[in-house]
Every structure is written in structure tokens, then in C-alpha cells.
């Protein structure tokens, strides 16, 4: 009797194990794993990893009804993230085309009450999405996350779902960054036009209530003051009936009660609370202390979603025309960078991200800059190791005739808003940059853009300054159009490029130019947002493109920057080589297109001689709390 019971138990256990193994292998086959590869965010996300399908199809895919195809004929296996043209350095690759991605998957949780979203971290550039043949939405613009709800009517709870994404990376003049042609008729652009799902794709499970935005904003009036931490959570009710929703949380282990409110069907509601931290441990590059924040949303008597993030208490301000961090005026030194990799292009992995951050630290940088919002994991690494981030949207060299168009400014405004909403909880981010190298002689169009963007950024996040990087040309003079900006970044190529009418050909003109800029904007923080020289060979110090020239260039420019106690930062462009565009020469008489060779590291990661000069100079500069 007892033996029979034992045997029955054994059989049952084996059956359960087999079912579990079967479900697990189905999940593994679909490549869906719980969680995100970065830490901050909600706890109900699933990485859509594993095998994806891909096919290139120059615009003809819709005619072939690829969005409806159920067989896998003509599709090749790929993995996501993916840049389909990584390694293809042709003009056609830079110009862009259309690629199709497809993911066949089963839901990792079949309960009927669950809603599902699909979240794309970065798709370059225009995306259209179908689920099981039905169109479910579209998006324009890379480097920022966006999501779509998987309509209940189209979603299969049991069995296989087919998610199809058409990605069009043919750059237009009105895109960020815009297309254009160089003098020789090649496609222009500041970095390679990688097409594809450049960052991860997630499924997000929603149990009626979702968190659509979450802000933890520590406010600090002075470095020895108590901090006031604002926590604001916006929830959305996906259900068909009103729900009583309670939001609670903690910051640094101390409880936060954001209250209980009724949230109507299909509506949003904001919950907020403040917490006083009387003796905060401040975050700074020399002591990047992080507080852990947690949130839980309860509805209908159960916990429907949790959210966690790391936060840091610090203040960023401008005082006496200098950037301050926790009341200390700073003279930051740092590097610009691209999330590029010789093999995978912009579809880089965690190891590559960690490598970039480690290299920036090893160089002695306290600040990094890129032309677009970085991957979320880059921000988390920067928070953890104490690197400040100049956060910019890719409104890069947009010509006035296009910036004039309302549709262009609207997209820019959306990118700015999305960047702030997605990334504002990172203590590493010290400012919002609204673009790079728009016309150096701004008129009413740029003035309108700047005023609107600054107002918008301040309304969304009053705690951070707003800046713009501009080409450093003496002929620009003092520009009243920059009045609304807190920070001006000067891209300094004195002695490298000639500039219009040869006005920056002479390196010796740099010092006076910087002083003139200072005189124009005595109350703004001024920093050098770029300086750099290409180098790919040994040779005479006077010859552009040699390692020796690059060493001399960095030493002389840093000497000038060091001599300006009012300068808030100096950022070398760039940490490492990257792909720019076909026929790029970057001012080097012996270039190696498409590689941008101003990097201190070659594309293969090896160090150029100038690396050591910059490293030595950065170490010798009191970057935090100098003058
Ligand atoms: C710039 C751009 C940067 C380029 C650099 C160059 O001003 O902002 O994206 O890579 O010049 O090397 O010409």
C-alpha cells in the first residue's frame, strides 16, 4: 500500500518534472528569459532573445506580404540586437535600406488577465510592427525606447505568435542625424548608419496596472543640507473597470507611501511622495554612492508590479559661470564616444559596454559624451563607477532649412522628452544637450528651437542644466540666440580643420578665441565639448595624421584649456576609433576610410601614444573642486 503510494508520488513527480522541462525547453527554444540585462526598471519584463529571423528586402517586403508569411522560407536566422550592415562599409550600406525581422514566440505566461507590451530599446530608424499579420504600430527615431501594446484580439495565448518588424534606415534630410551628401557625392553623416534592432527587445507583462513613468529626483539645496527626494509614479490602468491602486516604496531602506487612489479604466494617474534625507551620502565621481529605491503597486488585493532603481544624491548647478557638483566648481576632463564595435557595429553587448566604461575610467575621465542617448546599461555603469554624462539627443548638424520645419522640431521635442523620461533617474547625467553643431551663426529658427527646448527640458526636469554643443568659430561672435542655455559646449578644432575662410587654421588663435567666448557668456558654464586630431601612423610631428602630431595636438590644446580656470570641462573626441562614412578623411592627408581616427584607442582597442599624454594630463588636473 505504502509502496504503491510512493510509486504514484514518484510518477507524479516525474510527470511534473517532465512538463516543467518541456515548458522550460519551449521557453528556451523561443529564447525568452525573464528580466532585463540592465538593473533599473519594472520586474515584469522578458528578454526576447534566442533566434530571430531576418531578411533584407529593399522596400519590396510589403508587396510580398512578409508580415503575413507563416513559413520561414527566405528568412535567415539572426540574433537581436543586430546591425544588419555591420562590416559592410559600402556607400549602399551607409545610404540605408529596408530589413525585416521576425520573432516567433509563445507567451511565457498564458493567464488571460495579462496584457502584453513589446518594448524596443533602439531601432534605427523607421519601424513598423505586425503581430500575427495585424499592424500594431510604428515608430521613428533611434536610441530611445518605445513600446506597443500587443492587441488582445491579435495575440495568441496558446501557440506561436509572430512578431514582424520592418526597419527602414534610409536616412532622410529630416532625420536625426540627417542625411546629406559630401562634396564628393558620398552620403554624409557623423557616424555609420547601422540598420536594425540595435538594442534589445523585451516583452512586458501587465497585470491590469502598469507603471508608465517613474521619477526619483533627489533635490539638494547645498552640499551640507538635507536632501528632499521626490518620488513620482504614473500608472496606467489597462483594465475595463476602475481599480483601487496603492503605490508604496522605499528609498535607502526608508519607507515611502505614495498613497491609494482610484484609477479609472483606461486612464493614467500620478502618485507622488517626498522623503527627507537629513544627512545624505552624496554621489560624486570620487565617491559614487548609490541609494536603492524600490516600488510596489498593488491593485485588487495583489501586487501587480514592482520596480527598482539605483539613485544618487547630488546637485548640479552653475555658479559664477562655472559648473558645480555638490557646490564644488569642477574642471572636468573626459572623452566623447560611440557605442561602436568592429564586428557588431552599434549592436554591442554588455562586455563591450563594460570595456568602454573601464577604458574611460582608465584614461582618468570624469565625464563622457556621445551624440545620442546611451544604452541604459551604460548609464548604470556610469552611475556605479562615477562617470558624469553629457546626455545629448541626435539633433546633429541639422540644417536651418530643415530645423525650420515643424515636423522636424516636433520629433526633436519628442526625443528630448523621451530622453528625459527614460534616463532622468541616473545621477551620472549632469545635463541635457539639445543638439550638436547646428548653424554656428544662429538666427530666428535656431533661437526658436533653443527657447522651446530649454523650456521643455526645465519643465520636465528642473534639476539639470541644458546645453548645446557648437562649432567653435571666431566669426560667430556673441550670439543672443543662446541666451536661454545654461551651458555652451565648444567644439575646438583649432589647428586641425581650417574652418570657413581658414579662421581656425592657426592653433595659436585658440586661447584668445576661448577668452572671447567667455566674454560673450560670463554667466554660462563654458566647456570644450570636443577637440581631437586624427592619427594612424608614425611620422614627423608637423605632419597631420601622425601619432606625433596627435600627441603634440593634445598637449598644446590641453595646455590652453588648463590655462582657463573658468572652463568647466574639456572633452577629447574620441575615446576610440569608430566608423563614420565612406570616404571619411577627417582632415588627415592619409586617411583610412570609413574609420574616424581621432580616437586615443584604435578600433582594435590598442593604445596610441597620445593616450598616455591625455592620461597624464587628466591625472594632473584637479577635476573636482579645483578653482
Ligand atoms: C565634430 C562632430 C563630430 C565629428 C568631429 C570630426 O564637430 O561633432 O561628430 O566626429 O567633428 O572629427 O570632424
Image (tube, rainbow, N blue to C red):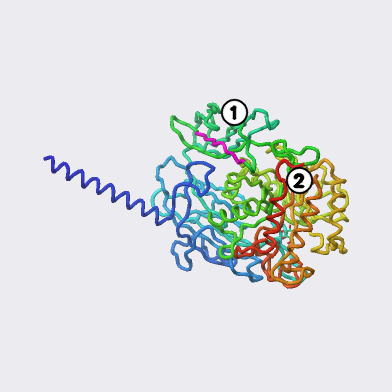
Q: Secondary structure at mark 2?
A: loop
Q: Which residues are magenta?
A: 287-296
In this view, the residue in front, 155 or 349, is 349
Q: Split into 4 quadrants, where in the image is the N terminus?
A: top left
Question: Marks 1 and 2: which is nearer the front?
Answer: 2
Can the viewer see residue 249 in this picture?
A: no
* Residue in the foreground of this view, choosing between 181 and 512: 512
Residue 603 x/y as whole percent: 62, 64
- Magenta stretch containing residue 94, yes or no? no
Q: Could you tell me which secondary element the residue under label 1 belongs to?
A: strand
Left or right: 4, with 319 as reference point: left
For this rendering, which residue is in front, 548 or 292? 548
Residue located beneath label 1 in the image: 273
Residue that appears at 70% across and 52% down: 618
Quarter containing the C terminus: top right
**Which is the main secondary structure of the residues drawn in magenta?**
strand
Q: Residue at x 77, y 45 (%)?
A: 487
Horizontal placement of 331 versus 159: left or right?
right
Q: Are marks 1 and 2 in contact (CB under 8 Å)?
A: no
User: Residue 409, how many percent across, how many down?
Assistant: 73, 49
Whether residue 6 is visible here, answered yes or no, is yes
The relative height of residue 263 versus residue 613 in the rendered view (above or below) is above
Q: CA distance from mark 1 to mark 2?
A: 34 Å
Q: Quadrant of residue 89?
A: bottom right
Mark 1 sits near ligand 1, with its Cβ under 8 Å away: no
Q: Residues within 10 Å of mark 1 (few under 14, many from 20)?
A: some
Q: Residue 289 magenta-drawn?
A: yes
Residue beneath label 2, please? Answer: 568
Q: Position of residue 234 (x, y in %)?
A: 58, 35
Q: Position of residue 310 (x, y in %)?
A: 56, 39
Amino acid at each position: 500500500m505504502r509502496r504503491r503510494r510512493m510509486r504514484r508520488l514518484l510518477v507524479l513527480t516525474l510527470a511534473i518534472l517532465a512538463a516543467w522541462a518541456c515548458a522550460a525547453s519551449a521557453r528556451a527554444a523561443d529564447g525568452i528569459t525573464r528580466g532585463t540585462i540592465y538593473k533599473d526598471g519594472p520586474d515584469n519584463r522578458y528578454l526576447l532573445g534566442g533566434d530571430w529571423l531576418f531578411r533584407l528586402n529593399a522596400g519590396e517586403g510589403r508587396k510580398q506580404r512578409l508580415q503575413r508569411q507563416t513559413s520561414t522560407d527566405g528568412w535567415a536566422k539572426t540574433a537581436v540586437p543586430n546591425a544588419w550592415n555591420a562590416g559592410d562599409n559600402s556607400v549602399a550600406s551607409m545610404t540605408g535600406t529596408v530589413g525585416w525581422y521576425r520573432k516567433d514566440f509563445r507567451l511565457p505566461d498564458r493567464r488571460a488577465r495579462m496584457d502584453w507590451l513589446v518594448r524596443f530599446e533602439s531601432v534605427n530608424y523607421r519601424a513598423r510592427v505586425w503581430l500575427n499579420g495585424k499592424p500594431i504600430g510604428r515608430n521613428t527615431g533611434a536610441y530611445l525606447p518605445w513600446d506597443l501594446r500587443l492587441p488582445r484580439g491579435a495575440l495568441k495565448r496558446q501557440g506561436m505568435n509572430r512578431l514582424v518588424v520592418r526597419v527602414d534606415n534610409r536616412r532622410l534630410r529630416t532625420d536625426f542625424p540627417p542625411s546629406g551628401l559630401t562634396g564628393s557625392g558620398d552620403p554624409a553623416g557623423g557616424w555609420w548608419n547601422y540598420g536594425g534592432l540595435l538594442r534589445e527587445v523585451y516583452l512586458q507583462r501587465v497585470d491590469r496596472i502598469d507603471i508608465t513613468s517613474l521619477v526619483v529626483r533627489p533635490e539638494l539645496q547645498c552640499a551640507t543640507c538635507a536632501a528632499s527626494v521626490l518620488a513620482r509614479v504614473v500608472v496606467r490602468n489597462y483594465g475595463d473597470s476602475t481599480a483601487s491602486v496603492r503605490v508604496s516604496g522605499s528609498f535607502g531602506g526608508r519607507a515611502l507611501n505614495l498613497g491609494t487612489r482610484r484609477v479609472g479604466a483606461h486612464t493614467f494617474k500620478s502618485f507622488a511622495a517626498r522623503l527627507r534625507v537629513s544627512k545624505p551620502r552624496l554621489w560624486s565621481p570620487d565617491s559614487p554612492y548609490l541609494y536603492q529605491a524600490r516600488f510596489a503597486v498593488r491593485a485588487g488585493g495583489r501586487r501587480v508590479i514592482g520596480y527598482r532603481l539605483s539613485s544618487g544624491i547630488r546637485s548640479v548647478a552653475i555658479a559664477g559661470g562655472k559648473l558645480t557638483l555638490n557646490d564644488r566648481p569642477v574642471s572636468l576632463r573626459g572623452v566623447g564616444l560611440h557605442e561602436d564595435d568592429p564586428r557588431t557595429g552599434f549592436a554591442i553587448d554588455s562586455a563591450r559596454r563594460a570595456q568602454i566604461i573601464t577604458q574611460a575610467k582608465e584614461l582618468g575621465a570624469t565625464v563622457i559624451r556621445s551624440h545620442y542617448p546611451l544604452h541604459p546599461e551604460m548609464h548604470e555603469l556610469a552611475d556605479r563607477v562615477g562617470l558624469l554624462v553629457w546626455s545629448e539627443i541626435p539633433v546633429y548638424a541639422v540644417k536651418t532649412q530643415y530645423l525650420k520645419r515643424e515636423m522636424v522640431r516636433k520629433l526633436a521635442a519628442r526625443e528630448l522628452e523621451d530622453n528625459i523620461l527614460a534616463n532622468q533617474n541616473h545621477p551620472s547625467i549632469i545635463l541635457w544637450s539639445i543638439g550638436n553643431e547646428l548653424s554656428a551663426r544662429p538666427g530666428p529658427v535656431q533661437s526658436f528651437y533653443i527657447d522651446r527646448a530649454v523650456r521643455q527640458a526645465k519643465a520636465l526636469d528642473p534639476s539639470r542644466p541644458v546645453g548645446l554643443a557648437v562649432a567653435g568659430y571666431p566669426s560667430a561672435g556673441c550670439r543672443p540666440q543662446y541666451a536661454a542655455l545654461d551651458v555652451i559646449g565648444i567644439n575646438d578644432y583649432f589647428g586641425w580643420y581650417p574652418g570657413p575662410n581658414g579662421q581656425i587654421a592657426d592653433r595659436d588663435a585658440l586661447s584668445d578665441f576661448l577668452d572671447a567666448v567667455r566674454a560673450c557668456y560670463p554667466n554660462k558654464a563654458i566647456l570644450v565639448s570636443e577637440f581631437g586630431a586624427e592619427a594612424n601612423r608614425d611620422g614627423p610631428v608637423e605632419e597631420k595624421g601622425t601619432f606625433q602630431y596627435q600627441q603634440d595636438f593634445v598637449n598644446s590644446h590641453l595646455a590652453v584649456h588648463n590655462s582657463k580656470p573658468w572652463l568647466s570641462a574639456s572633452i577629447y573626441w574620441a575615446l576610440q576609433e569608430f566608423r563614420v562614412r565612406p570616404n571619411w578623411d577627417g582632415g588627415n592627408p592619409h586617411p583610412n576610410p570609413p574609420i574616424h581616427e581621432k580616437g586615443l584607442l584604435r578600433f582594435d582597442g590598442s593604445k596610441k601614444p597620445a593616450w598616455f599624454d591625455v592620461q597624464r594630463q587628466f591625472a594632473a588636473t584637479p577635476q573636482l573642486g579645483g578653482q
